Image (cartoon, rainbow, N blue to C red):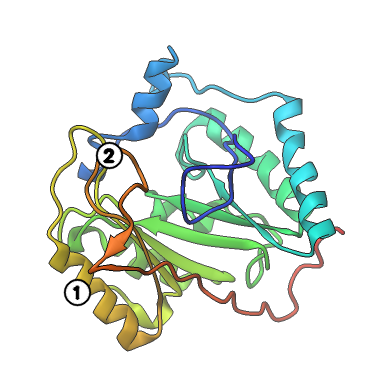
Amino acid sequence: MSQNTFISWTDSTFNIAWGCSKVSEGCKNCYADNMASGFGYDVWGLNKPRRVMGAKYWNEPFAWNRLAEQAGQRRRVFCSSMCDVFENHSTIDQERQKLWPLIRATPWLDWQILTKRAERIADNLPADWGQGYPNVWLGVSVENNDHVWRFNDHLSKIPSAVRFVSYEPALGLVTDLDWLNLDWMIYGAESGKNYRPQDLNWARAAKAKCDEFGVAFFYKQGNGFKSGTNPQFDGKIIQEFPAPRSIPDGLALAA
């Protein structure tokens, strides 16, 4: 967890656990796997344990919420950068149950939850989800058109204050999305020393679709050795954020 982060589209990161398993070609050079291994944690794989966090860690977002309220400025929190909140793993299932009360109790934080397991979102949302929590943004990773089903078949049908796609690592064209139900796209070419090269025309095609359908477009980075170090897109920095939709009869979050 970090109150500040190098991930340019969020303000803070919070992890319900560390560890995951790889499900598609986008996972090949997973930064989180490499980071966990670098710290000596053997937590990647279906049958591997997951690293969990203590009470002090879980209390940190309450401090962020107080600071955001005092400043009168909402804070975005990416959950989780080191695991997948919707992974089918007993430890993740257990820790996810602790996440929803935390989100309800931190109304000044906008929780950005990103998954590759779109098929598991609907069955693992809290019972009081209704039309969505007003401070939760749901997203799926889509690395090329072979994986647009994650959004089209699943997330596009789930009510949420913001529905977004993380087009990272970009490994091919993404043009076949259900654009009418998308609020935000983050584009990022692969980073790290073993990155697979992007074709900038992939970003151009996605940006054109976003412009056509009124979808906010955030260009995170081109290829590079360090995430977020080369954010210019055709000579410009384009880092747009969505306007969350109002939730009718939305859940009254704790103050």
The x, y position of residue 196, in whole percent, is: 15, 43
The x, y position of residue 24, in whole percent, is: 24, 43
Q: Give the quarter of the figure containing the C terminus.
A: bottom right
State the mark number for residue 27: 2
Q: Name the side, left or right, on which 107 lies relative to 79.
A: right
Identify the residue at image location x=36%, y=28%: 33
State the mark number for residue 205: 1
State the mark number for residue 38: none
Outermost residue on the front side: it is 235
Q: Give the quarter of the figure containing the N terminus.
A: top right
Q: Looking at the image, which is closer to me, 17 or 32? A: 32
Identify the residue at image location x=76%, y=59%: 107
Q: Name the side, left or right, on which 44 lies relative to 109.
A: left
The answer to which image quadrant residue 181 occupies is: bottom left
Identify the residue at image location x=37%, y=69%: 238
Total labels drawn: 2
